[in-house]
Amino acid sequence: MKIIVTGGAGFIGGNFVYYQLKNHPQDEVICIDKLTYAGNLETLEEAMKNPNFTFIRADIVDREAIYAIFEQHHPDVVVNFAAESHVDRSITDPAIFLQTNILGTQVMMDACRKYGITRYHQVSTDEVYGDLPLDRPDLFFTETTPLHTSSPYSASKASADLLVQAYHRTFGLPVTISRCSNNYGPYHFPEKLIPLMIANALADKELPVYGSGENVRDWLYVEDHCSAIDLIIRKGRVGEVYNIGGHNERTNLQVVETILRELGKPESLIKHVKDRAGHDMRYAIDPTKIHNELGWLPSTSFDVGIKKTIDWYLSNKPWWEKIISGEYEQYYEKMYANR
Ligand code: NAD
Ligand code: DAU
């Protein structure tokens, strides 16, 4: 099988490349990535040594470039991870989110229609469902929860999902969609909560918690997300949506306190800062469908996963220290200086 993985130089796409090469060594993986600020070829250094792996730098919005890749490689399966993924950036500059996340999805699906594939898989997010109230712990997102977005990021992801479903119904494109909760683990870009807090704590810098810090996220170790997508592309039913999550709900404050405890740093580093505009209160996934249909279960609890993640950041300082110097410093200044 030949699989195109878009966004493979990013966090989850990179982990998925390694998951495929390890678990399906007979398959060929072709990674397409634009290498935006979030894409990092160092993440793929080991994969580059594998003869079954090919990296191509291209923008998924660039129709000509994408068609040329399909013409040359004739993939069987496409897994579309490529996206602008950071909610805060979508609040300061929404346009690129609409281009990559919606129009890029359209170009990828047009290429699939033109050249023929057995499966197009769209990597979506639980954020398309909006949020849940804190005082209703009995509520969870299911695949039939209405789409109800809060940020330009989530609106762009929901738009893409609708387009994917339209391409299935109208053109018969064999699609699947997965909607996962918050991931964490190796190669997570340090603008996101967990790696940002690890990096700041190690440098004895303030840990900027938005608002009260009571917002809840449902954390999933990235390898468990990869195993779920792998099952969906091989055994999932065409036209279906699958929610992915592992019932690991934590408030942001709990996450930050755990990191500080693991690193032996004081809680006085925590600084409550101005809240994110439109900040979603709680995400919580009901993964019953993927469990019942495909037998998927997460294998890493939050307590184990956060330790593994912290260890990875301690052992891989060159990977992230390079990222947080240079362009990232300007981003940090703009986002956090007067917060
Ligand atoms: P990321 O920001 O770490 O990586 C995105 C990758 O896509 C980067 O390598 C970037 O260079 C590439 N990219 C961006 N625009 C591109 C374009 N126009 N053409 C080609 N490549 C482009 O993101 P991530 O956290 O790994 O998320 C991957 C996918 O998973 C996204 O679709 C996101 O919506 C979804 N998702 C993420 C999470 C999470 O917790 N991070 C949870 C659920 C779903
Ligand atoms: O739920 C899936 C989504 O999870 C994905 O679709 C997104 O691509 C991914 O970025 C993530 O979105 P979040 O907004 O939940 O993740 P983030 O790491 O940005 O923030 C997690 C929580 O922590 C959120 O409530 C905001 C808060 N936060 C974040 C940062 C960066 C802080 O309190 N301080 C911070 O500095």
Image (spheres, rainbow, N blue to C red):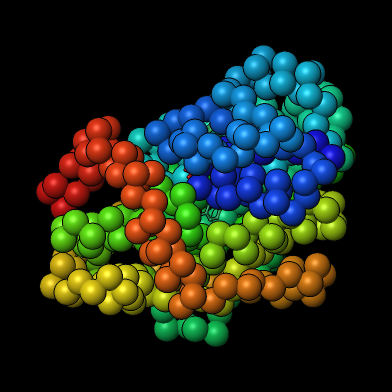
What residue lies at 70% left-to-right and 61% top-to-bottom? 228
What residue lies at 82% left-to-right and 43% top-to-bottom? 26
Q: Quadrant of residue 311?
A: bottom left
Residue toward you, 145 or 24:
24
Q: Quadrant of residue 65?
A: top right
**Residue 326 can be seen, yes or no:** yes
Residue toward you, 82 or 23:
23
What residue lies at 54% left-to-right and 76% top-to-bottom? 301
Number of marks in picture: 0
Q: Quadrant of residue 294?
A: bottom right
Q: Is residue 79 above or below residue 240?
A: above
Side of 137 where 230 appears, left or right: right
Q: Is residue 152 above or below residue 224?
A: above
Quarter of the picture holding the N terminus:
top right
Q: Position of residue 88 (x, y in %)?
A: 34, 48
Q: Position of residue 121 (x, y in %)?
A: 73, 45
Q: Position of residue 275 (x, y in %)?
A: 25, 60
What residue lies at 77% left-to-right and 56% top-to-bottom? 232
Q: Is residue 79 above or below residue 96?
A: below
Side of 275 where 286 appears, left or right: right
Residue toward you, 114 or 44:
44
Q: Is residue 297 above or below residue 7?
A: below
Side of 18 where 214 appears, left or right: left
Q: Position of residue 134 (x, y in %)?
A: 41, 79
Side of 64 where 215 appears, left or right: left
**Residue 253 can be seen, yes or no:** no
